[in-house]
Image: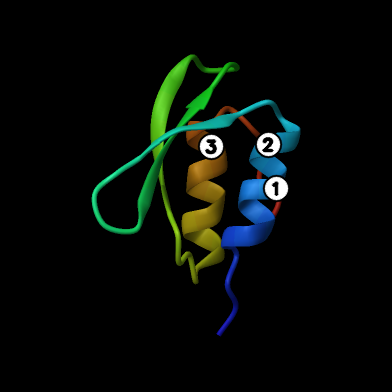
Amino acid sequence: MANFTRDLKQYLREADCYLERQGKGDHGIWFSPITRIRFVVDNHIKSRHTANAVLKQAGLPKKF
């Protein structure tokens, strides 16, 4: 099964999103300067639908 986490985090960093803090468990709290909101990124994303949903929250187009 695929793991989209590394590619997703790299794409978010290229879009100037950044990790604000570590959340509970294996989740990180990220901030998007595009949407000016915080969103959660799991450290083990195995679904492309979940990865694209994170991108949508960050204000970015689908990539996966």
Q: 49 or 15, which lies in front?
A: 15
The numbered mark, 3 or 2, whose residue comes first in the sequence reads 2
Label 2 crowding class (10 Å Cα cut-off): few <14, some 14-19, many 20+?
some
- When asked about the image quadrant of residue 60, the answer is top right
Is residue 40 at all visible to an observer of this figure? Answer: yes
Q: Residues within 10 Å of mark 1 (few under 14, many from 20)?
A: few
Q: CA distance from mark 1 to mark 3?
A: 15 Å
Q: Residue at x 55, y 85 (%)?
A: 1
Secondary structure of the residue carrying tag 2 is helix
Residue 33 lies in quadrant: top right
Residue 56's label in the rendered image is: 3
Q: Which residue is mark 2?
A: 13
Label 3 neighbourhood size at 10 Å, few (<14), some (14-19), many (20+)? Answer: few
Check disc 1 and report the residue beneath it.
Answer: 10
Q: Amino acid at mark 1?
A: Gln
Horizontal arrangement in the rendering, residue 21 relative to residue 4 (left or right):
left
From the top left corner, tell me how far across and down residue 26 is, in percent.
Answer: 34, 58
Q: CB of mark 2 within 8 Å of CB of mark 1?
A: yes
The residue at the point 62 percent across, 48 percent down is: 9
- Is 9 in front, or is 62? 9
Q: Is residue 37 above or below residue 46?
A: above
Which numbered marker is on residue 24? none
